[in-house]
C-alpha cells in the first residue's frame, strides 16, 4: 500500500524559504501513469492547489505562487520536494503531498497526513 | 479566491439525501472533469469521485457525482453521522493552466 509522509521546517520567520519533503513508501515514485502534487490548507480556510510535477520533469504551478515555488523529485530517493521562497504569514498552512492518478481523471488519489508550517516573527 | 463556488454549508438528518453544488465556468468545469474529496480537518483528504461521476473502489455507492455544463454536484444519499465532514470539488482550469479547488462545503448531520 503506497504511503506518503511529509516532513520539514515547522516554524519559519518571514522572508525565509519553506522546504518540505514527501517520502514515498510502498511503491515507486517513478511508476508510470502518475504525477505528484502539493496542496495546502491555511487555518480556517479551504484547500489550495500549489502545483504538479510529472515524471518528465514538467511542472505546473498555481499562478499566485509561481514566482516563489519549486516542486522537484528525487527518483533515486523516492522523494518529492517543495520549496517556497520569501514566505509571509499568509503561507502559514497545513501542507499535503499527494499522488496524481493520470488514469483516473488526474485525481489526487493518495494523500499524506500533512505537516503544519507556521510563519511568524 | 477560488473560481469554483460551493455553498458554505449543507445539512440533513440521518437517512436523508444531501446535495452539494460546485459552480464554475467554461474554462474549468465546462471543459475538464470534476473530482470530489471528503476531508476531516487534520487528516488526509479522501478521493470520493473522479471523472465527474466515477467512484474509486471502496467508496460507498451512497456518494454520487454529476455534471451539467459549468456546474457539478455531489449527492450523499442515506446520510450517516460519519459523513459529517468538509467536501471539496476540484477541476483543471485551462485559463489558469492549473488546478483549482472549490470553496468547500461543511456537511452537518442533524
Image (tube, coloured by chain):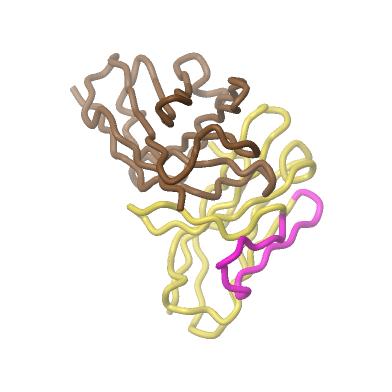
* Tally of numbered tags: 0
Vertical arrangement, residue A121 with respect to residue A105, above or below: above
Q: Residue furthest left?
A: A121
Q: Please give the name of the residue rendered at 41% of the width and 52% of the height, measured from the top-left corner.
A: B44
Q: Please give the name of the residue rendered at 48% of the width and 26% of the height, measured from the top-left corner.
A: A75
Left or right relative to B68: residue A64: left
Residue A66 on image: x %, y % = 52, 19
Residue B43 on image: x %, y % = 36, 54
Q: Is residue B53 magenta?
A: yes
Q: Is residue A91 magenta?
A: no
Quadrant housing residue B15: bottom right
Q: Colour of chain B?
A: yellow
Q: Please give the name of the residue rendered at 57% of the width and 23% of the height, measured from the top-left corner.
A: A63
Vertical arrangement, residue A118 with respect to residue B21, above or below: above
Q: Please give the name of the residue rendered at 43% of the width and 46% of the height, measured from the top-left corner.
A: A26
Residue B61 on image: x %, y % = 63, 74
Vertical arrangement, residue A30 with respect to residue A121, above or below: below
Left or right relative to A66: residue B22: right
Q: Colour of chain A?
A: brown
Q: Which residues are magenta?
A: B52-70
Residue A112 on image: x %, y % = 40, 45
Dominant secondary structure, magenta: loop
Quadrant housing residue B19: bottom right
Q: Nearer the viewer, residue A82 or B41?
A: A82
Q: Nearer the viewer, residue A22 or A48?
A: A22
Amino acid at each position: 500500500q503506497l504511503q506518503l509522509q511529509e516532513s520539514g521546517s515547522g516554524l519559519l520567520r518571514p522572508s525565509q524559504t519553506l522546504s518540505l519533503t514527501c517520502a514515498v513508501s510502498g511503491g515507486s515514485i517513478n511508476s508510470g501513469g502518475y504525477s505528484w502534487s502539493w496542496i495546502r490548507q491555511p487555518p480556517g480556510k479551504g484547500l489550495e492547489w500549489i502545483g504538479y510535477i510529472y515524471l518528465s520533469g514538467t511542472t505546473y504551478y498555481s499562478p499566485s505562487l509561481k514566482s516563489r515555488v519549486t516542486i522537484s523529485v528525487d527518483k533515486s530517493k523516492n522523494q518529492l520536494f517543495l520549496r517556497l521562497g520569501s514566505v509571509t504569514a499568509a503561507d502559514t498552512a497545513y501542507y499535503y503531498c499527494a499522488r496524481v492518478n493520470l488514469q483516473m481523471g488526474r485525481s489526487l488519489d493518495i494523500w499524506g497526513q500533512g505537516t503544519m508550517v507556521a510563519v511568524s516573527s | 479566491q477560488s473560481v469554483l463556488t460551493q455553498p458554505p454549508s449543507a445539512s440533513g438528518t440521518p437517512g436523508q439525501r444531501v446535495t452539494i453544488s460546485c459552480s464554475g465556468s467554461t474554462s474549468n468545469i465546462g471543459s475538464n472533469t470534476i473530482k470530489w474529496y471528503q476531508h476531516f480537518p487534520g487528516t488526509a483528504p479522501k478521493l470520493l469521485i473522479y471523472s465527474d461521476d466515477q467512484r474509486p473502489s471502496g467508496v460507498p455507492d451512497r456518494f454520487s457525482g454529476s455534471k451539467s455544463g459549468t456546474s457539478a454536484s455531489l449527492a450523499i444519499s442515506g446520510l450517516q453521522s460519519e459523513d459529517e465532514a468538509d467536501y471539496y470539488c476540484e477541476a483543471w482550469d485551462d485559463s489558469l493552466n492549473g488546478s483549482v479547488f472549490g470553496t468547500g462545503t461543511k456537511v452537518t448531520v442533524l
